[in-house]
Image: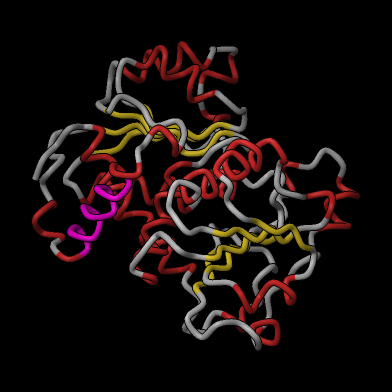
Amino acid sequence: MKNLMNITDLSVEEIDELIAVAQDIIANPVKYQDACAHKLMATLFFEPSTRTRLSFESAMHRLGGSVVGFSDAGSTSSTKGETLSDTVQVVGGYVDIIAMRHPKEGAPLVAARRAGVPIINAGDGSHNHPTQTLTDLLTIYRTKHRLNNLTVGLCGDLKFGRTVHSLVAAMARYPGMKFVFIAPEELKFPRHIIEEELDSRGIPYEEVTSMEEAMPQLDILYMTRVQKERFFNEADYIRLKDTYILTPEKLTNAKEDLTILHPLPRVNEISVAVDDDPRACYFAQAKNGMYIRMALILKMLEVTV
């Protein structure tokens, strides 16, 4: 596989295969510890990240490979005016694979045309975040033992949240799905994605503003933060940032086997009092990100174990 820009670059069969490999990595880590020996990954992060960058780097190290890169665009020659195309063409000459995050939508696709090595989109603006979606799918599979016949609630910033856009595009391809979009009017899920991914397939969905109203039917609750960095008007951010806060009280009518996910970082949209609830899976979800990225690196470098 040459590049991964969007979760739909992967077929359902390929996603299932990656999940199976990730499961085997979890069960048999020693088997994979030298799989990428003498391979080098670049992590080019033009936008801040904790989990995504560190999980990519941990994934490569746990496969026996090495990592170079940067976590701040201010430390690169882009501050001197170097183009993204030139940067990745140079870095592509040093490494075997690149994971790149950029604040501009479509930037990884531009980079992929010049890199000369496989590029993984580690998040581009409010557009796509395919490896977070793979992380989410692995977590759902490990908690529900299936990726079909589920009612998925997505709550919070559904307009700018690239994680929820990618997750809907991925899960819409599995049978028996239903989606519940929980958001204020200003942060509603984009209509064009609903038309492309749901309406075109006849997949049922609801758009509501009340978390409590939606809660009893949900198998998965995917919380998101309202992202300050996506707002041009700080007053709008302040007005909307506390719209939905998940507390133990709001879980009173939830299913006993509900899976609560969050791509992290959280601000205050999930109370810390929820962390001890066995249904809270977001820290396990973050750890799963390392395992699924290990599986993806193996696939993209065409390494068999």
The quadrant where residue 247 appears: bottom right
Whether 21 is among the magenta residues is yes
Rendering coords of residue 263 (x, y %): 53, 57
**In the image, farthest residue toward the front:** 202
Whether 181 is among the magenta residues is no
The quadrant where residue 286 appears: bottom left
Residue at the (61%, 74%) spot, across then down:
217
Residue at the (55%, 49%) spot, across then down:
168
In the picture, measured across the screen, residue 90 lies left or right of residue 199, that is left
Residue at the (63%, 79%) spot, across then down:
216
Whether residue 35 is situated above or below residue 213 in the rendered picture: above
Along the viewing direction, whichever of 54 and 243 lies nearer the viewer: 243
In the picture, measured across the screen, residue 80 lies left or right of residue 50, that is right
In the picture, measured across the screen, residue 5 lies left or right of residue 102, that is left
Along the viewing direction, whichever of 296 and 204 lies nearer the viewer: 204
Residue at the (23%, 55%) spot, across then down:
20
Q: Quadrant of the C terminus?
A: top left
Along the viewing direction, whichever of 241 and 133 lies nearer the viewer: 133
Rendering coords of residue 149 (x, y %): 45, 64
In the picture, measured across the screen, residue 135 lies left or right of residue 59, that is right
Whether residue 36 is situated above or below residue 113 in the rendered picture: below
Rendering coords of residue 135 (x, y %): 41, 54
Q: How many marks?
A: 0
The quadrant where residue 116 appears: top left
Rendering coords of residue 130 (x, y %): 45, 41
Which residues are the magenta region? 15-26
Along the viewing direction, whichever of 21 and 61 lies nearer the viewer: 21
Whether residue 211 is situated above or below residue 205 in the rendered picture: below
